[in-house]
Image (cartoon, rainbow, N blue to C red):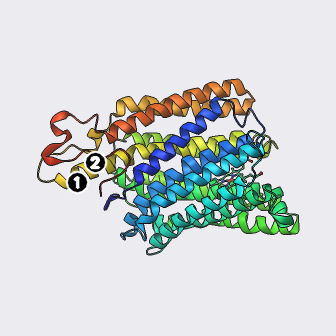
């Protein structure tokens, strides 16, 4: 079971993550960063890291702290590290973003904020990686092995990011300058492809099987999917570092990594289709129906990538490609899973202690799927429309799409808060037999 024992701070991580998502949407609405500014501009870097660290990484960490101990049936190596890690990641991100603003001339020139932010972020991520890594290491099979490869990719991402931050502050020496000049794609692929995508894949195997009552994916099959994905990241990081050292060969490295990534995504598609086919729960819950839109977006990312390479437009359209990967595939999946995980953990926390002594509601009684569906649909239609506006080079229409995405996300957040408050549970069953209402931001474990 996912919530064998409840991790105290999952909701705090989720709340911080959702707050950063709103910040990122507000920036896009306000025309800060790509497409209003150049893709490599400091404003775009603010936007990119609000999304990748603030929203996606914090949501992923919150889920993993709950989920990894369940996967390996062992307690977290050091639960007390989780809250300091959240503080370090938040303050590090604020410093990093302030450093980017200084770089773009929006704040007084204080480039030292970049390395300070990097050090705080690396310290926070180290606490997360050591805590989760030492926990997952106890039984490194199935989904836990995806998490381990994801954590290794996070280390590579943070290492590249820190070198960039020191180099941008003028403290990187000639080696730092060389890495900054050609290493950005390596950092981006290790972060989005390795850390976020491989971890999301591993976690989704377990969550899909559990919530659809389906047998686990064949271990050998998922190991091949992981090995291909891990090889793609290893080729990117090791091959890319070598190419920087030799000052040649970067395109070949990225092409090989791209092909491996494509194969891994296709194998993952096969694995997920198997889980859906073999499920015992025929009626799909909302989070599963929405997850299928996320898988469709991942397939869309693969098709778009191949098509853009074929017409020689990948470099020019990398913004649209990344937007679909980040908001269609990753953010859509995370939002759908947050909706279900919050309901499940809230149910466990509230009704677990009184179960068997008094009638309790079902998990599905905590959600109002009919109402929530429209917010997810608005979100997804807006993300796909946003991708098309980026491809067509229409920044005005893009902002309209972002406005619709914001509406969808605000609606989803409202649903999640209602779940946590038990607002949709019918009254006689809401708090039966001495059950205690949960706190919005932490679990009373
Ligand atoms: C320790 C944490 C991190 C630090 C210090 C950091 C720092 C940086 C810096 C300084 C750049 C700009 C390089 C340049 O000027 O060209 C950059 C770019 C980028 N970073 Fe990070 N980063 C971190 C974590 C992450 C993570 C976790 C992800 C994704 C999951 C990520 C995704 C990206 C992307 C996609 C770019 C390219 C953005 C663009 O060109 O518009 N970063 N990062």
Which one is nearer the viewer's eye here, 174 or 200?
A: 174
Disc number for residue 180: none
Residue at image location 68% in from the left, 46% down from the top? 98
Which one is nearer the viewer's eye here, 13 or 92?
A: 92
Q: Residues within 10 Å of mark 2 (few under 14, many from 20)?
A: many
Say if 328 sits above or below 192 in the image: above
Q: Mark 2: which secondary structure?
A: helix
Looking at the rendered image, the quarter that the N terminus falls into is: bottom left
Which one is nearer the viewer's eye here, 20 or 289?
A: 20
Q: List the residue tagged with mark 2.
A: 347
The image shows residue 167 at horizontal and vertical percentages of 79, 59
Q: Which comes before the other along the chain, label 1 or label 2?
A: 2
Residue 392 visible? The answer is: yes
The image shows residue 196 at horizontal and vertical percentages of 57, 55
Say if 229 sits above or below 401 in the image: below
Residue at image location 63% in from the left, 41% down from the top? 324
Looking at the rendered image, the quarter that the C terminus falls into is: bottom left
Q: Mark 1: which secondary structure?
A: helix
424 with respect to 24 (left or right) = left
The image shows residue 278 at horizontal and vertical percentages of 39, 53
Q: Say which quarter of the image contains residue 4.
A: bottom left
Which one is nearer the viewer's eye here, 378 or 299?
A: 378
Q: Residues within 10 Å of mark 1 (few under 14, many from 20)?
A: few
Residue 281 visible? The answer is: no
Q: Are marks 1 and 2 in contact (CB under 8 Å)?
A: yes
254 with respect to 324 (left or right) = right
Q: List the residue tagged with mark 1.
A: 352
Residue at image location 71% in from the left, 45% down from the top? 45
Q: What is the C-alpha distance between the residues marked 1 and 2?
A: 7 Å
């Amino acid at each position: 079971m996912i919530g064998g024992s409840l991790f105290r701070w999952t909701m705090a991580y989720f709340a911080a993550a959702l707050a950063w998502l709103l910040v990122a949407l507000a920036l896009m609405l306000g025309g800060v960063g790509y497409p209003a500014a150049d893709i490599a501009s400091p404003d775009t870097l603010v936007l990119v890291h609000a999304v990748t660290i603030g929203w996606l990484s914090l949501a992923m960490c919150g889920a993993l702290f709950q989920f990894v101990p369940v996967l390996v049936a062992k307690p977290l190596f050091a639960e007390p590290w989780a809250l300091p890690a959240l503080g370090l990641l938040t303050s590090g991100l604020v410093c990093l973003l302030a450093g980017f603003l200084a770089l773009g001339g929006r704040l007084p020139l204080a480039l030292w904020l970049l390395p300070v932010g990097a050090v705080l972020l690396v310290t926070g991520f180290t606490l997360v990686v050591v805590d989760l890594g030492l926990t997952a290491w106890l039984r490194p099979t199935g989904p836990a092995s995806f998490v381990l490869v994801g954590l290794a990719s996070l280390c590579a991402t943070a290492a590249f990011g820190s070198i960039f931050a020191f180099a941008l502050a003028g403290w990187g020496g000639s080696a730092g300058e060389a890495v900054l000049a050609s290493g950005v794609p390596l950092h981006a692929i290790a972060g989005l492809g390795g850390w976020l995508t491989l971890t999301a894949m591993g976690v989704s195997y377990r969550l899909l099987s559990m919530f659809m009552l389906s047998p686990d994916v064949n271990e050998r099959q998922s190991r091949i999917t992981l090995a291909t994905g891990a090889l793609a990241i290893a080729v990117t990081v090791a091959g890319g570092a070598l190419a920087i050292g030799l000052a040649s060969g970067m395109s070949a490295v990225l092409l090989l990594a791209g092909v491996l990534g494509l194969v891994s995504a296709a194998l993952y598609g096969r694995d997920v289709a198997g889980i859906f086919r073999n499920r015992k729960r025929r009626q799909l819950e909302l989070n599963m129906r929405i997850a299928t839109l996320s898988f469709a977006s991942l397939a869309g990312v693969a098709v778009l990538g191949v098509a853009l390479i074929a017409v020689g437009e990948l470099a020019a359209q990398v913004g649209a490609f990344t937007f679909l990967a980040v908001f269609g595939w990753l953010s859509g999946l995370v939002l759908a899973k947050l909706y279900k995980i919050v309901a499940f953990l809230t149910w466990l926390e509230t009704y677990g202690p009184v179960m068997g002594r008094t009638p309790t509601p079902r998990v599905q009684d905590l959600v109002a799927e009919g109402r929530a569906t429209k917010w997810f649909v608005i979100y997804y239609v807006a993300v796909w429309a946003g991708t098309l506006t980026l491809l067509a080079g229409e920044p005005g229409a893009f902002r309209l799409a972002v406005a619709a995405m914001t509406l969808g996300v605000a609606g989803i957040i409202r649903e999640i808060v209602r779940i946590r408050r038990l607002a949709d549970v019918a009254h006689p069953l809401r708090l039966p037999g001495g059950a205690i209402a949960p706190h919005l931001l932490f679990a009373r474990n």
